[in-house]
Every structure is written in structure tokens, then in C-alpha cells.
Amino acid sequence: MTISLRTNLFRFDPDELPAAVQYAASPAFKNGWQLLTNHFGRPYLPTEALEEMLSYITGGPVWINAQLLKGGPAIASLKEIQTDKLNRAVNVWAQHIMRKAPLEAQEFIKLLIPERAAPLYARDVMNDPRQSASAYKVVPWMLAQQLASQPMESSVPLNLEVSSDGNLLAWDSPLLYSYGERRAVAMHSVSTSLLLLHKVPSQYASVTVHLSHILPEWRHTTHSTWLKTERGISKFQIRTLPLVDGQFRTIYTSPSAELLELMGEGTLPALGGNEISLTGTLRPIHAHTPIGSPIGSGVGTVILDQASFHLQKTLTSAKPMLTRYVGRLIAQRDKTGNDSVRPIRIAVVTAHTDIMMRINHAYEHLSALSPVFKGKPKPQVTLQQIQCKDAQRVLTTKTTSTDIQQWFTNELLPRLSAFAPDAAIIETAPEVATKDDHDPKHLLRALCAKHGISTQFIFHLAPPGEGADTKKAMPAGVKSRMRKTKSIESDPPEDWPAINSLIDGLRGTGYLPLPLDRTAGIPANTTVVSVYVDHISKLNVYMPVITRTVVNTRDLQVYVQGADGHPGQWKSYSEGLCAIHASPGLLNEDDAKLMIRQALLAPTPVANTPLIVLINAGGKRLYPGMNDGAGSGLPPVPENAWLIRTRSDSQTAQMTGVHSLSPLAPMYIGNRIGVHQAEHQELVYYFTSYSKTFNRTRSHRYHTRYDVRQSELKDSWQQLGVTEFVMIQKGDFACNDQLALQTGYWCKNAPLWDGFLRLPSPLHAARQIAEDHPVAEKLRKGRF
């Protein structure tokens, strides 16, 4: 029997959806909007407060078209808004923006009166390219409204309510945990959206299910809260401010609360104080899934399949897109040479002696401790501890960038030069992991890279009883990661930070324990070029990282951009990594495309040999021809080469069940690893895999969280991992199925990673360089 999986993408008839409401902009309204924008001094007005106000008034989602001059309605809402309240809200909001201007300069605010309400139909906005922004914002509300028309069949009937952010909440069926003084509450949230399948003209409805953790008391990080009134459920942005006496005060982020009161719409509930009612009308949301919570993260696969069937029940035209199983992931048995590899030299820069002991213990027992090396040869490594004067002060306490540079030049560099390491593992501490300008990690990574040394970092863990003050000084996010690290294995407590630092240090040298395998149909001399494009939205700059390898070899190269307009060069992985990390500059769009074009001029070591080019979805910003919808322009890949776009993100379909086994009822999908082809687009493939947590957790199998014992709520319930491959350009060898199997095999069999990858291993290696770049990591508030 051919395996066919169900996805969470659905074809549907837009005419079956209920209409929303739109308020068009008259020429006078557009004129007033433009004048208000000019006064504000930025391209777009701060419409979040107005959306919160109108959502609270109407009890449903509202969208304000900030890009009004580009087309579309001025305002869209799921429910009709009373005309007088709408006009009053717009007027009060506009006056708030103009509050510092003289009264005579505010006359144009009178122009901001939208036209009367009119129906907004799904088909009209979905078929009009000029209203694409409206379609992707409003049609998901219509889908949500349709899903809310009937209770969802689950372990308990779920009455879903549409909140102001468009999500469906199981408000009356929260998950509750209470044991002794510990309390926790979480709530299921169903999200609907419109997604595209590559170059398929019609949009698909998508449904996903999430678990939102609610604060049991006002002492956790939160950015938003739900508030239920007789009109509906509203969502407000909130934030917590520190006070002088060490206490905290939580406030509404936008001025919507004071403006609603000014309108006479009442006073929003006060924030902060003591405990929060677990089933009250005000439910603040954890900013991040709380580590160590009695209720774990995720909802599991069963309730996602239930939501998919609920969509089909309430939207009778909806039909899920299925997939076709492609085949087994089996490598060819090629004979490869056993190249001799010199010992890898790793310097361990410490402020505490236990760091060297931990790294040395990790290396001595690497084959037993790390699954990575259980079936792979262990490399020869020479470890040397480097201790410097003032190391503890510089590495484990906050200091200045100047101080770090002077210490590196005077103390650390001479010792590193004497040992000439390939990589360095450097100690740091949670106290300095605040990602501010004085974090030594970013600066030391760049300084070491200038001298050809890749770096990894490791925390010093204070023994019990030593670090009471240290723990208080930790940032909250760091404390969470530390708790998570300790909870991965409790019996016996393996030192995973030391093991991972050592393995990542080996990766930075370019070491690969085994050659890159190939599958059937892929020639033995095929070159694989991987282009990873990282876009730093804060500065609108790019970091392209390009790697190259040949199947059946262990050599991994990196393209390094030339200076002053000169062509770049292919260098060893270690040299390329250091050259990129030593460069402080990121690239604009034109320079990023120039670098990629130069790398693809001579992409193979031997001319006219088979070539596969892998590129991540971030490349769509540079080459819109890779978009799922409209767009033109592709990377300058040779005509005879394959170009494959890969991604694993919120735009990727999820797998909900095995349709060939259970076409009429929800089911547990199980541990599915393999490659599947999309039913409606022969160029799109999916690699499905499972994590270790998914594999070993029993409580999520065949259940929803409503079924399990309270003690099992703490388990993490994940979805099956999915990576999408799109065949953008066909090469002159092999076929679509063979390339999909090969790419999936590289996700399944990672050289230096335990488990399965979301990106094929050559592309993942490029991603690691980009994520570790000191400047990009600092801008992104990167993780340790």
C-alpha cells in the first residue's frame, strides 16, 4: 500500500465563507491620512492602538490599512462597528498623535471619516492582486468565524471563540494544574491562515494548533494579555517596567487604554498585583514557554488532525492536500579513500580549572557520551589549557570592549600564537550573557577569527552552594536555558554543554568524520553548492554564506568575497569561517547578489561536472523568482544544474495524519521519516522527521492533553518535523524524485549533529557560519 499523508493545507470555495466588513477611504480621508502621516514623520502611522481600540469596541479582529495609499479598504473588521463609535475612535486616536501640535494645525483631522460599512467577500479580495494584503489579513478571520460556528470534536467538546488577533481560543476549556503551591494554566489556540503552494495560482487554507501558557501570577515575563468582555475576546500589548525599589509595574504598551477611557468606553482592568485568577476574564500570556512548567510546550499531533477534520466539517468544500511517498533513503555503497587527518589542535581558554576537566572528560568518553560518534570515527584531538592573567575578570564579569581588546592583545594572543590552535573553546559566564555591547563573546570571536582561529564558548557552572549571587545576576532567558540544559538528562547527569562545545569546536575546523554520501541517480563527481542568505531586518542588510563540497569527499569549502572589487576565492571551511567572522561588514542587496553571482561563475572544482545548488528560503528576498507566488529573477545558476529551494518555517505545510490508513477520522501520525511529494505540485517535496523528544514521549501518542494524567502534562508535545524542497530549476541528470531523496538523505544523515536536520547538511553548515557571525548574532540577540 502506498503511504499517503494528510497536510494542513486545504483547497476550498471562498463563497462558502461569511463576509467581513470594510470601510473604504474617500479622497478626503486619504488626504487627511497623508497629512497625519507627514506630521508623524515616518512612512506608516502607529495603527496598533487604533486596532486595539476598535477590537475592544466591536469584540472581534480589526485591521487598519497603514499602507492606505497602495490600495485596499481603510479599515476592515469581522463585525460591523457602530458608525459614531468608529468615527469617534479615529478622531481620538488622531488627536493623540497630534497632541503636541497647535490646535490650528489639527483641522485636517476632521477629514478622517471613513465611508459607510460595506460587505467584504473572500472571493473578491483573493482574486484581486491589488488587495493581497487584505486577503491575507481578513480571509483567515472568515475561516476562523466558520470554524467557530460549531464545537470542535476533541477529547472534550471545544467551543472556539474568535479573539481580536484572529485566533480561535478554547476559552472555556483551559488546561489546569494545581498541586500544593504550584499552579499552571494553558489554553489551546487554533490559527487559520492563507498559504501558497509554489506557483499554484489559488491560495490554500491552513490550520495549526498552539498552546498558550497563561501567567498564574504577575512575576513572569509577558508581552500581551487577553481580556474577555461581553462583546468578545480582545488582546492587548503590555509590558513590565522595573521600579527603583526592585519591584515591577505592568502597564498597557499602547495608549489604547487611556484613549478608550477618554471615549467613555470604560476603564480597562488594572495590571499587576498578586495572583491571577486561573479562569478569570484577564489572562496574561507568557512571553516564552516557561521552562520547568508543570504544563509543557506543544499540543501534539492528534489535536492538529482533529482541527483539520473540524475545518472540513464546518467548511464542506475544504479538501486536504495529500502527499505521495517517494521512496527509501538509502545511500550508494561507494568506495572512498581513507585520507589521513592530522590531529586537531584545540585551545581551552579558562578562568576556572573545572572547564579543562570537563572538556577533557568529554573528549575521552566522546564515543560513549555522544551519539554522533557512536558509529563514526573519533578524531585525534590535542587539547591544551590556556590560562591568562585577569582571565576571570575579563571572561566572567562585565567589562568594557577596550579592556577586552587589550587583554586579548597582551595576554591571550601570545599564548594562542605559541600553541597555533585550529579552534578555541573559551569560558564565559551567565553574568555577561546579556548580549549588550560589553559581552566578550562577540568581540573575542571576531578577534580570534582575524588570527585564523574559530571559537566556541562554554559556561562555567558554579558548584552547589557557590553561586547564589551568580544566579540572581543571570538574565531570565539564560536561567531558563540553564535549567533546560540540566533537565535534558538527570540520570546520569551528562555534561551536555561540554560535549556540545567540543563537537561544535570540531565543526568549526571543518572536520567531517565521514564523506558526503550520495543516493541512487546522483553522479559520483557531483558538486553541491549551498547558498544560505541571512537577512538582518533591523538594518536591512544581508549575510550570504556559500559552501561547496563534492559527494564522496570530506572536503567542505567556503566562498570568501574578494576585497576592492576583486573576485573571491574558495577556501577551506575553517579559513572561510574565520574570514567571514573577522569581517564586521554586512552587505546590501546589490553586494549580496554580486557575491552570489561571482561564486556561481565557477561553482565546480572541475568544469562541466554535475552541480546541485541548494538555497534557503531567505534567498527569495534577493531573487523573487523563487517566490511561491508572483516574482521574477533567479540566482545565476548554470543551465545544466539543479536549483533547490529549502525551508522549514511557518509557511511550510505540516503533516496531520496518514490518509491511506485513516481517511475518515483523526489519528496519531507516528514516527514518519521519509520524502513525500505534494499532490498538487510535482515540484514540491517534503522531508518528514521526528525529534528525540517526539520519539521518546509516550503521553502524546493517541491522546490530547485533556486525556492524560496531571503528572504527564509536563511533557513536551511536538509536531512531526517538515522540510520543504522546491525544484526551482531542473538539471541535466537524475529526476525530481531522485533529487528529493538525495536532499532528504542529507537532512537525515548529518555529519556532526545528533538527530535529523531541518536543512540538508551542506546548507546547514553554511547556516552555522551565518548564525555565529559576531555582528549578525549581536543584532539578532543570538543564543549561546
Image (cartoon, rainbow, N blue to C red):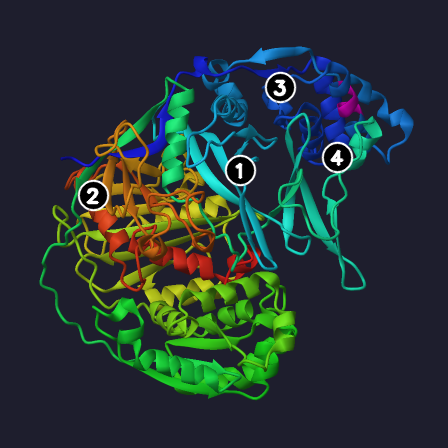
Q: Is residue 374 magenta?
A: no
Query: Pointer 3: residues within 10 angstroms few (<14), some, or many (20+)?
Result: some
Residue beneath label 3, please? 79
Identify which residue is drawn at 12% across, 46% down: 521
The mark lying in front, picked from 3 and 4, is 3
Q: Quadrant of the N terminus?
A: top left
On screen, 363 above or below 246? below
Label pair 3/4, CB-CB below 8 angstroms: no
- Name which of mark 3 and mark 2 comes first in the sequence: 3
The mark lying in front, picked from 3 and 2, is 3
Identify which residue is drawn at 49% across, 62% down: 583
Helix, strand or loop at label 4? It is helix
Query: Pointer 1: residues within 10 angstroms few (<14), some, or many (20+)?
Result: some
The mark lying in front, picked from 1 and 4, is 1
* Label of residue 256 in the image: 4
User: Where's residue 97, x and y in %?
Assistant: 79, 33
Residue beneath label 1, please? 173
Q: Quadrant of residue 342?
A: bottom left
On the question of residue 595 being in view, the answer is: no
- Name which of mark 1 and mark 4 comes first in the sequence: 1
The mark lying in front, picked from 4 and 2, is 4
- Name which of mark 2 and mark 1 comes first in the sequence: 1
Residue type marked 1? Ser
Residue toward you, 257 or 40: 257
Q: Residues under labels 2 and 1: Cα distance?
A: 46 Å
Residue toward you, 760 or 2: 2
- Name which of mark 3 and mark 4 comes first in the sequence: 3
Residue beneath label 2, please? 739
User: Where's residue 437, x and y in %?
Assistant: 63, 65
